[in-house]
Image (cartoon, rainbow, N blue to C red):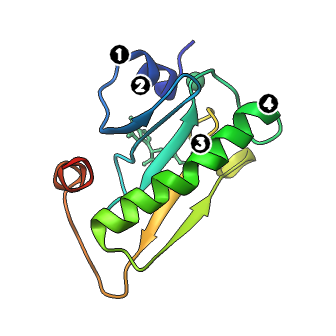
Amino acid sequence: MDCIFCKIVNGEIPSYKIYEDDMIMAFLDINPYAPGHTLIIPKEHTLDITTINKETLNHLMDKARDIAKLVNEKLDAPGYTLIQNNGFVQEIKHFHLHIIPKYRKNYELDVKDVYEKITQ
Ligand code: 5GP
Ligand code: ZN
């Protein structure tokens, strides 16, 4: 299937991966709204909130708490937002949850440097 996120799961497209298990994967967004912008996806292809199976969704949301805590602590972000797009506002047609750290002041950092901060 011609899906960018399936290719990321398969390693055909590189990514800054910060978490992986049997069901899900989390990696840094290539075009972040803010440093630490992370996407969490199911490894198995599925379109959106209407098609993801409950077991996978529950697991993904459970891990999202831990991943958000890790990302925000490593980057000293005082808050964060979770969003998930469906329908025409969804650019990539493979379910993904966004974790978007929020900073009180404007803060910019390259994705590569963010990755090093999170994984060190
Ligand atoms: P959506 O609008 O579908 O909820 O968001 C898709 C997100 O995927 C965007 O924030 C975009 O920057 C990100 N994205 C698109 N292509 C790639 C890619 O090849 N690698 C990574 N890491 N993120 C991507
Ligand atoms: Zn896919």
Determine whether the residue tagged by mark 1 lies in a helix, strand or loop: loop
Specify which label sits upstream in the sequence, 4 or 2. 2
Q: Is residue 108 above or below residue 120?
A: below
> 13 and 88: which one is in front?
13
Would residue 24 appear left or right of 26 to someone viewing this image?
Answer: right
**Residue type at tag 2:** Ile
Q: Which mark is residue 12?
A: 1
Residue found at x 34% / y 23%? 13
Disc 4 residue: CB within 8 Å of ligand 2 = no
Whether residue 31 is visible, yes or no, is yes
Horizontal side, residue 13 vs residue 65: left or right: left
> Which residue corresponds to mark 4?
53
Report the image quarter containing ligand 2. Answer: top right
In three-dimensional space, the C-alpha distance between marks 3 and 2, rounded to whole angstroms, equals 13 Å
State yes or no: discs 1 and 2 in contact (Cβ < 8 Å): yes
Where is residue 6 shown, x and y percent of the image? 51, 21
The 10 Å Cα crowd at callout 2, few under 14, some 14 to 19, many 20 or more, is: some
Give the number of the mark in front: 4 or 2. 4
* Element class at badge 4: loop
Front residue of 1 and 110: 110
Asked whether mark 1 lies closer than 8 Å to ligand 1, one says no
Residue 50 percent coordinates (x, y):
83, 38
Q: Which residue is mark 3?
A: 96
Give the alpha-carbon distance from disc 4 to disc 2, as whole Å: 21 Å
Q: CB of residue at label 3: within 8 Å of ligand 1?
A: yes
| Residue 119 x %, y % | 24, 47
Badge 3 vs badge 2, beta-carbon distance below 8 Å: no
Q: Secondary structure at mark 3?
A: loop
Q: Marks 4/3: CA distance?
A: 13 Å
Residue type (three-letter) at the residue carrying disc 4: Asn
Q: Is residue 1 above or below residue 72?
A: above
Q: Residue furthest bottom?
A: 104
